[in-house]
Structure formats: structure tokens, C-alpha cells
Image (cartoon, rainbow, N blue to C red):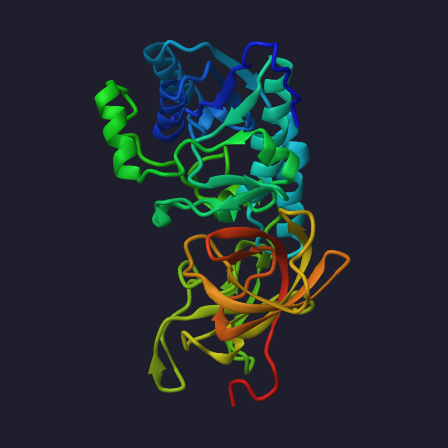
Amino acid sequence: MIERSATQPPKPVFVGLSGGVDSAVAAHLLLEQGHAVEALFMKNWEEDDEAGYCAAAEDLADARDVAERLKIPLHTVNFATEYWDRVFADFLSEYAALRTPNPDVLCNKEIKFAAFLEHAQALGAGAIATGHYARRTQDADGYELHRCADEAKDQTYFLHLLSQAQLADARFPLHAIAKPQVRAIARRLGLKNAEKKDSTGICFIGERRFRDFLARYLPREPGPIETPDGIRLGEHQGLAYYTIGQRQGLGVGGVTAGREAPWYVAAKDAAGNRLVVVQETHHPLLMSTGLNALRSHWISGQPPAPLPFACLCRLRHRQPLQDCEVLSVDNGQCRVRFLAPQRAVTPGQSIVFYRDTQCLGGAVIERGWSEPGSFD
């Protein structure tokens, strides 16, 4: 955490200016609050800029326009090496292991609140700010991360790996306002990006045909698509390219067992290179009454006590909060039971824990499980 002397003038807050409307309005709100504000634009991907997926040049132009209108200095930095080493290498490793990672989670921890924070400090920052929709509070025990006022935009799921040190120097100016208000403020300020659509796709890499993108780094290994009974329905392009619960892009259809219905990915059989699919939306193979998770992280520094403890969780961004019980936590591993069965528990994704509005932390899903007789 940055130490500040009462005799020194306040240090500026550095805003991660992405070129989007959220970070632009975050910078404006900080100025309204009386802060000295500077901006930093991060470039984090260089592999195929010429293909136009990343739109880094367009985003930088938008960031410059915002900085000029707000009359704040704009710095630029290239974190492509850090992104590759700290985020993308893990991303590829997880897909190669047939898990489905969430790079946005690691990107926040390693780039937006680590590399950015370190660089901003070197430039004289007293704190950093982003356009994330989240709320930070402080009490005698430290810092807490809470869901924001606009529940539809809340991004605490992606921020659950932040530490006490990272939260200490982080600011979230948008915590109390909704997205329509953000756009209205941008229009009032005359910002060119007021109506710019929200970014989607992989963190910093942008929108693209994901299977083709992944195939550049992981070889295609086709194999059979089968029912749980071993009936062959088609051929997959490589198990790494599919996600548990996936419906679109399977290339199978037709009538099986007298029924015509959508197919869903239920399992990836690495030993047989088989993609197992089922037709029922809530087929027992798609449902879990609990899960095991790895690499648990608790924002306070430790899990709530005593164990077991009841809390809320979500297994994917924007999923309604689910009741659960954390049964055990041991050397980063945790075991969780759901009060209601959950569909498509996906290895590699994050389970994030909450109590009321407070985000407690989370872990990486290893596998789902079901207690005997759950779906008889």
C-alpha cells in the first residue's frame, strides 16, 4: 500500500483509460470529487493487430479524445509481455488440460491491478481507478469488495482475486450509478464514445471466431461425438474447443430414441478423445449437487470461520446468486455443496462466494459431483 505524508500534496489518481465510456466517466467523476487525475492507456496484445480484432488504435484514439476533453494527461504503456506471461500462458495451459478458464479474472489480478498499479506508482500515482462496476469499503479489519448499485452490471465476479494490498490503492468511481446514467454523463460531456458498445470477448484480445483463434495455439485433434450409451453422432474438432453445457456449434442433430431435441455437451472423455452429449437440458450428467475447487482466494486473507459456513455463490458472471455451503478449505482446495442442484458446473471456471453484497473471494472449479441417489 502506498504511504502518504500529511505534509505532501495529494498524489494524482491514475485512471486506466481504455477508450470505453465507463473509464471515461470514472475519470470525470474523480475530477468532480476534487482529485488530481491522470490517465494511462494499456496496450496488452500484439500478436495479430493487423487483423483488426483488438482495435487498439481506435481505442487509443478514443482515450486521447477523452483525455483532451477532460484536460488530463494521458500516458501509454505496453504490457503485451506481461499479459502473455501472466495471463495468456495460463489460458492456453488450462485449455490444453481440457478446462475452460476465465482470463478476465486473471487479467484483473495480474494486469489491471498489478502491472498497471506498479507502473502508475512509478509515475507518481497515489491510487489507481478503473471503470469497473464494484464497490470498495474499509473497516477496522481491512478492505472489503461489494457488489455495486447496478446489479445487472456488477463485475465483482471478475475481481474476486484482488488482495488487500490491491484494494487499498484501487478506486471504483462507478459503484453507485447505473449504466444509463454513465452514458447520459458522457453525452452531457460531449464525449465521442458516449454510445460506444461495451467490449466483449477475451480480455484485451477482442471479438473473434474463438475456435479458429484457439486452433492457432492448440492443434485440432478430432474425435467422436457420442451419447452416454456410445452411439456415434458426429465428429468434434478437438475437446479443448468445447465447454460443458454448450449447445451451439456441435454440428449434430436429428432424432435419437424417438425424440428430436437440442444436444448439450455433458462430458469430455480425454482417454477416448470423446465428446459426450445429451439431449435433456437438465440431464443428470449436466447436474451437480456440489463441487471441488482449487486455488481458493479469500479477499480478507482467510475464509470465514468456523467451517462449514453458509453463503451465496455464482458459477458464472450474471448467474443469479445461489445458496451453498462451503464444507472444507484445505491448502487452497475447497469443497462446496449446493442447496439446489446446479447445471453445467465447468472445470476451469470460477466459483465466487458472497455474503449479502460482500464478495468473499473464490476458487477455480476442479469438478462437479453429485451425492448418490440425487437424480434417481
* Residue at the farthest right position: 331
Residue 57 position by quadrant:
top left
Q: Where residue 263 appears, x then y in whole percent? A: 42, 71
* Residue 243 higher or lower than 108, as above or below: below
Q: Residue 343 vs residue 370: left or right?
A: left
Which image quarter: residue 321? Answer: bottom left
84 sits left or right of 177 in the view = right
Position in image of residue 277 (x %, y %)? 49, 72
Residue 176 in the figure: left or right of residue 234: left
Q: Is residue 13 visible?
A: yes
What residue is drawn where x is 30% and y is 38%? 179
The quadrant holding residue 6 is top right
Q: Position of residue 209 (x, y in %)?
A: 44, 43
Q: Nearer the viewer, residue 145 or 239?
A: 145
State whether residue 85 is above or below residue 159.
above
x and y, in percent, of residue 45 in the image: 55, 28
Name the foreground residue: 67 vs 239: 67
Q: Is residue 234 visible?
A: no
328 up-or-down from 162: above or below = below
Q: Is residue 317 above or below residue 262?
A: above
Residue at screen point 57% across, 41% down: 139
Number of numbered discs on residues: 0
Residue located at (59% from left, 19% from top): 120
User: What residue appears at the point 34 percent right and 28 percent down from the top-left corner?
Assistant: 21
